Image: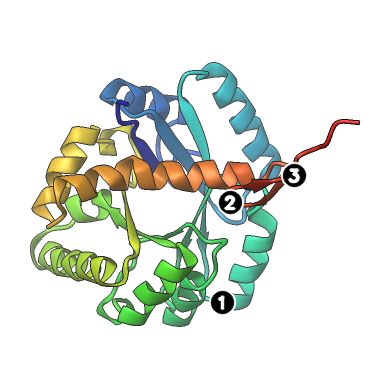
Amino acid sequence: MKDRFYDLHAHSFFSCGTDSPTRLILHAKRLGWHGLAITDYHPVNLNLFEKIESIMKKTFSNFDVIIGVEIKTEKISELKTALNKLRPIADVILVNSQDIKVIRAATKDSRVDIIAQENFTKEKIDPTLFKFAAKSKVCFEINLRNLLQSQGAHRTHLFKLISKEIHLVRKFGAKIVITNGACSWLDIRAPLEIIALAKCLGLSKEEALSAISKVPYEIISLNREKRKPDFIMKGIKIIKKGV
């Protein structure tokens, strides 16, 4: 079966981006993506959220419009409250924090999908985070926008951090998701470009391909499955017996 590609992190002008969801989706589709997460920061306007979802899914019936939320907080209590509110409605949840305690709590919580790469520091590349994440099935992001917009010593630093991230993901059996992290249609690169860049970062072709196809697909499909009334756990559903 032909691979299908999903980018789980893009911001429109409803968030911190500069373009409409429609423009982002049209460009992503033109480049060969099959799904794009239109991501907003928490707290989100739920009415607007639902309206965008409805319009986008009717307009792009042959393209997967993914509803994403990025929780940016420095308090564990705020993280827990946001997860309780957002998990029933979001296709994908990213967590972004400069507080190592919040990141640690997020890696232990199976309601979290992705640890956002933004604000990565040396302190946060803690091996125990990858051990917790592997057990909770929480993924780590490689955000190409952060890398490609950096320069000089900062870019070198990011390369080193990503290299260590890849090493720890392999060691503990965690997973990586690669995103464009787009805030503009100009930030979106084609899937094959992503794979080429990922190989430069030290990923194998198979690992890079999985990070934009299999892994993101598993995230969104499981989260949507969980919202169905007959869902009990992965692989188990309520079956109604005939009279």
Q: Are marks 1 and 2 in contact (CB under 8 Å)?
A: no
Task: Answer with mark 3 or mark 1, whichever residue precedes in sequence.
Answer: 1
Q: Using a 10 Å C-alpha cutoff, classify the residue at mark 1 as few (fewer than 14 neighbours), some (14 to 19) or many (20 or more).
A: some
Could you tell whether 205 is left or right of 89 in the image?
A: left
Question: Residue at the location (24% across, 66% down)?
Answer: 170
Whether residue 124 appears in this view of the structure is yes
Nearer-the-camera pick, 121 or 19: 121
Which residue lies under the disc numbered 2?
Answer: 234
- Label 1 secondary element: loop
The mark found on residue 111 in the picture is: none
Residue 25: image x %, image y %?
41, 27
Task: Answer with mark 1 or mark 2, whichever residue precedes in sequence.
Answer: 1
Which residue lies under the disc numbered 3?
Answer: 238
Quadrant where the image shows the C terminus: top right
Could you tell whether 150 is left or right of 146 in the image?
A: left
Which residue lies under the disc numbered 1?
Answer: 75
In the rendered image, the residue lying farthest to the right is 243
Q: Amino acid at mark 1?
A: Lys
Dividing the picture into quadrants, the one containing residue 152 is: bottom left
